[in-house]
Image (tube, grey):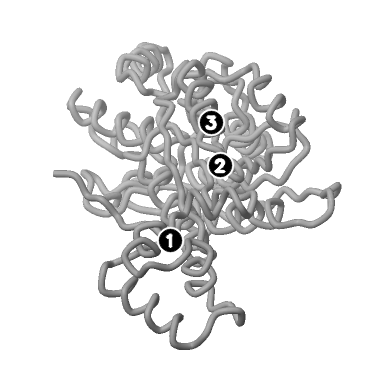
Amino acid sequence: MNFNAITIRDIAKELKLSVSTVSKALRDSHEISEKTKKLVLEYARENNYRPNPIAQSLKQGLSKSIGIVVSTIENQFFSQVINGIESVAYSQGYNVIITQTHESYDLEVKNVGHLTHRSVDGLLISLSTETKDIEHLQKLHRQGLPIVFFDRVTNEIETHKVIADNYNGGYHATRHLIESGFKRIAHITSPPNISITKERLAGYNQALADAGIQLPENYIKYCPHGGRDISEIENALNELLSMNPKPDAIFTTSDRITTTTLFLINKMGIKIPDEIALAGYTNTTLADVLNPPLTTVSQPGFEIGQKATEMLLSLITSKRPVTEFETAVLPTQLLVRKSSIKK
């Protein structure tokens, strides 16, 4: 079934008016008589006329659309970010186009290319775990496309960025485990090239140093694709549990890694926290009902999306070149539950 929306030309033909007259009447121009305006508006309303946003954007030089690039929308954190983005974008008359990289650099490049071919006015992006070369973004930045990074960011492009306080998130989660009586705290995290890995790892290391705890380097395990493949987490966990002495606690640093680690430990029949404690990052609303309830660092996903969109729209609508940029750091929150508390 085809839906054929009527156009200004259709209205003009039906009412035996010029296209110019109809266009001006719809815009409430003073050049058109009230009688003609009423005739045109009533016909447009009765026949469900809607302005063509593409045609309007061509006249205005704006598409009124912004592109979004995330790893996957099934991730609770990114779902919350997108909700925040939409809350601001829609209120300002912008549409959003959402794409997923599934942690693939090649797909990120393709998605960014697709969005720019759709003539988006700006781009909001969280880099994939595979992304090391950002020339595809640098080229667009040099050409003047407004870009704002969030969550996983880069320092190679001078623009606005929005992140959670990853350092303090890592620090407080690790310090909590130490204060709960755990000393051999392992760390399962994303690949070392991405910003969130570095920031959360720095917090973890500082908490250990402040407590005078030194651990072997192999207590830190990296998942090359952020745990997208469950075998990455499984291998990391098996290596940790085969150590002598093995860890008495694990700090994990993403939704996927955290919840999968909990699942695997339960599957192995290892009791949490009696045999090994667990604290991690996750924005899942199910953390309270997991077995056991999971101690997590929660990020303000919705607020990150709002702030990033406000920053992007300020770049899009600026009448002058923007030369001063901000990295907004929003606070995280440690939510302590049974998975990290000794009985």
| Vertical relation: 243 (above or below) 193 | above
Relative to 261, is 103 on the left or the right?
right
| Residue 7 visible to an observer of this rendering | yes
Q: Which residue is mark 2?
A: 120
Q: Which residue is mark 1?
A: 51
Q: Amino acid at mark 3?
A: His
What secondary structure is marked by label 1?
A: loop
What secondary structure is marked by label 2?
A: loop
Q: Amino acid at mark 2?
A: Val
Q: Position of residue 331 (x, y in %)?
A: 59, 56
Along the viewing direction, whichever of 331 and 295 lies nearer the viewer: 331
- Locate residue 147: give its quadrant: top right
Q: Name which residue lies at 43% across and 27% down.
A: 101
The alpha-carbon separation of the residues under discs 1 and 3 comes to: 22 Å
Q: Name which residue lies at 32% across and 39% down.
A: 74
What secondary structure is marked by label 3?
A: helix
Sequence-wise, the earlier of marks 1 and 2 is: 1
Which label sits in the foreground, 1 or 2?
1
Along the viewing direction, whichever of 74 and 55 lies nearer the viewer: 55
Q: Which residue is mark 3?
A: 117
| Residue 220 visible to an observer of this rendering | no
Q: Name which residue lies at 46% across and 25% down.
A: 188
